Amino acid sequence: MKKVVIVATGGTIAMKKDKSGKSIPAVSGEELLDSVPGIREIADFEVVNFSNFASCNMKPENLLKLANKVKDIFINKDISGIIITHGTDTIEDSAFFLELTILDSRPIIFTAAQRDASEFDSDGPRNIRNAARIAVDERAKNRGVMVSLNEKIFSALYVNKKHTSNVETFSSGDMGIIGYADIDRLLFYNSQKSKFKFDIPDNFPTVIPILAYTGMDSSIVEFCINNGAKGIVIEAFGRGNVPPELEDGIIMAIERQIPVVITSRCHSGRVLPVYSYKGGSSRLKDFGCIFSEGISTAKSRLLLGLALTKTNSCSKIQKIFNSIIS
Ligand code: DAS
């Protein structure tokens, strides 16, 4: 029988209601496995209890540890795949980070639940079962890091949580799903993988995401510059436009060798230098801003952080962003 490692990190999938009826961490990795009838007929499992917290705690230091743990597990060539249970809130960040740092053809599947383990119809057990089916399937190799919930299989590159509570919460927008775990068999449609990989660094540089809003000035950017930011991500409007008063802060950051990445608050599409009014995307490009190529703000923060471990040249970092997708 194939061997699969389940790395439990926490999230609602591993929570139960406390006396006041609110969800708190409660379930170990072993208990998660035991909640899935028949799962031991799919594979031999080894459990790693990595953490048991809500995913708002998954800071960069934890991501570095998680990536190293996955790398260590894969030293054993007998392991067919790895399942990582995680909170839905930041699962897309962690999956993306591993997609950028793990070079191995074997499947890594992140899964989670919207309904905790004390709900009579928790979605956790079914999601774990489907993740196990993916982990032992030869066709799941070479598809990059995946996120699977509610039967759907997503690439780590584009997946995004869309609904705060519904089990049908994840979407990859225009990019779509890469597979589907139907009841009779798994279907794989395509793969979406990063073309660029990083070594796992020892430290993660401070990168601050900033939300653009109408009427804002440059004071938040100046605060970040003066408080140790090594990189800044600005979630702009539409094609990558910001309030005119933000230009001064952006210029100041770039002059101080702090790269600025422009993302969009739109869920699909790329930012592109097409407007040349003050604050327009074309001017930002001329100042030296990096355009995110459709990578979300949360993921751009991680990608910029990893890129900064190699260079702080805006043109080189732009090439890295371009190469993720091209
Ligand atoms: N509690 C949240 C988290 O840990 C949500 C969840 O897991 O669904 O991310």
Image (tube, rainbow, N blue to C red):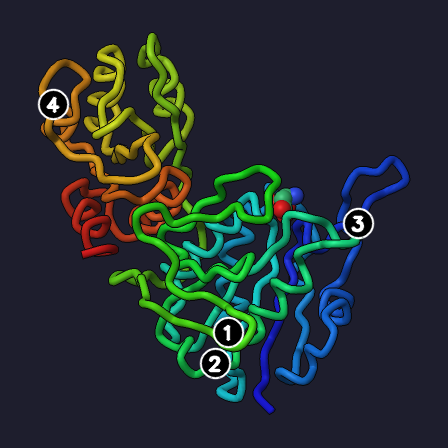
Q: Is residue 100 above or below residue 168?
A: below
Label 4, label 1: how many angstroms apart (C-alpha)?
44 Å
- In the orientation shown, which residue stands out farthest toward the front? 184
Label 4 near label 3: C-beta < 8 Å? no
Q: Is residue 55 visible?
A: no
Label 1 near label 2: C-beta < 8 Å? yes
Q: Is residue 198 above or below residue 174?
A: below
* Sooner in the amino-acid sequence: mark 2 or mark 3: 3
Q: Is residue 82 above or below residue 228?
A: below
Task: Name the foreground residue: 80 vs 121.
Answer: 121
Position of 49 with respect to 193 (left or right) is right
The residue to which callout 4 is attached is 275
Which quadrant of the view contains residue 6?
Answer: bottom right
* Sooner in the amino-acid sequence: mark 4 or mark 2: 2
Label 2, label 3: how many angstroms apart (C-alpha)?
31 Å
The residue to which callout 1 is attached is 134
What's the amino acid at mark 1? Answer: Ile
Residue 240 placement (x, y as % from top left): 23, 28
User: Which disc number belongs to residue 137?
Assistant: 2
Position of 9 with respect to 153 (left or right) is right
Q: Secondary structure at mark 3?
A: strand
Q: Is residue 249 visible?
A: yes
Label 3 near label 2: C-beta < 8 Å? no
* Sooner in the amino-acid sequence: mark 3 or mark 4: 3
Q: Secondary structure at mark 4?
A: loop
